[in-house]
Amino acid sequence: MTSITTTLPQAHPRAPARIMLLLLAAVFALPFVIGSGLFWSGWRPAGLRNHGELIQPPRALPVNEALHGRWLLIVPTYHGCTQSCQDTLLRLQQAHAALGKDQGRVQRVAVGATPVQMAQGLTIISPAADELAWRRALDDFAPAVFVSDPFGNVMMRYAEPIDARSVLRDMERLLKYSWVR
């Protein structure tokens, strides 16, 4: 009696190990591929964007020792402080108060020739001597809110109407990552 044995073709013994290695490599490489694709496409998460408009290049403020060393929230009031200007100053006062322990690092400034009625904690500057320099730094006294860094550079702008929450979020982020105390 002869027995006939048939052998079935067997898979290569290392095939499952190779598949596992390729899957493992894909798991580690896939986030880099997706991240690179998102970076080069220009996508950014909405939570990481600033709410104001960055001014490139930053503009230097005229030298004023009273303002040096603090972050400034600047409101141009050169053409008088209308009701919208008063509302802006009130919103900035609320945002400034909401900064909590970092309030001392920020100063609110009104730049203009006319006095402002709401002057609680507000520094008023009449730029008579350096009016041209202030005009250059503040877009010819455009109706907006400007942010200046502690070195005297105007670096961000918020157009009318001002959203105090947006200003507050940006200021919190700036103060958190600023190494200038």
Image (tube, rainbow, N blue to C red):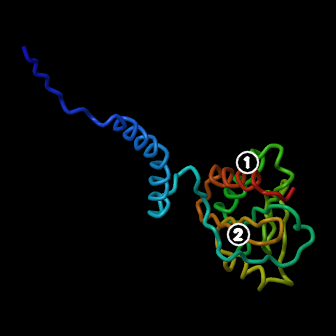
| Real-space Cα separation, disc 1 to disc 2, in angstroms | 22 Å
> How far across and down, in percent of the image, does residue 105 sit?
84, 55
- What numbered label is drawn on residue 94? 1
Secondary structure at badge 2 equals: strand
Residue type highlighted by circle 2: Met
The quarter of the picture where the C terminus appears is bottom right
The quarter of the picture where the N terminus appears is top left
Residue 17 vertical placement versus 68 (above, below)? above
| Quadrant of the rendered image containing residue 10 | top left
Residue type highlighted by circle 1: Gln
Judging depth in this view, the residue of 58 and 86 nearest the camera is 58
Residue 141 vertical placement versus 6 (above, below)? below
Secondary structure at badge 1 equals: helix
Judging depth in this view, the residue of 23 and 176 nearest the camera is 23
Q: Earlier in the sequence, mark 1 or mark 2?
A: 1
> How far across and down, in percent of the image, does residue 96 sit?
76, 51
> How far across and down, in percent of the image, does residue 13 sit?
34, 34
- The residue beneath circle 2 is 155
Residue at 70% across, 59% down: 86
Residue contact at pointers 1 and 2, CB within 8 angstroms: no
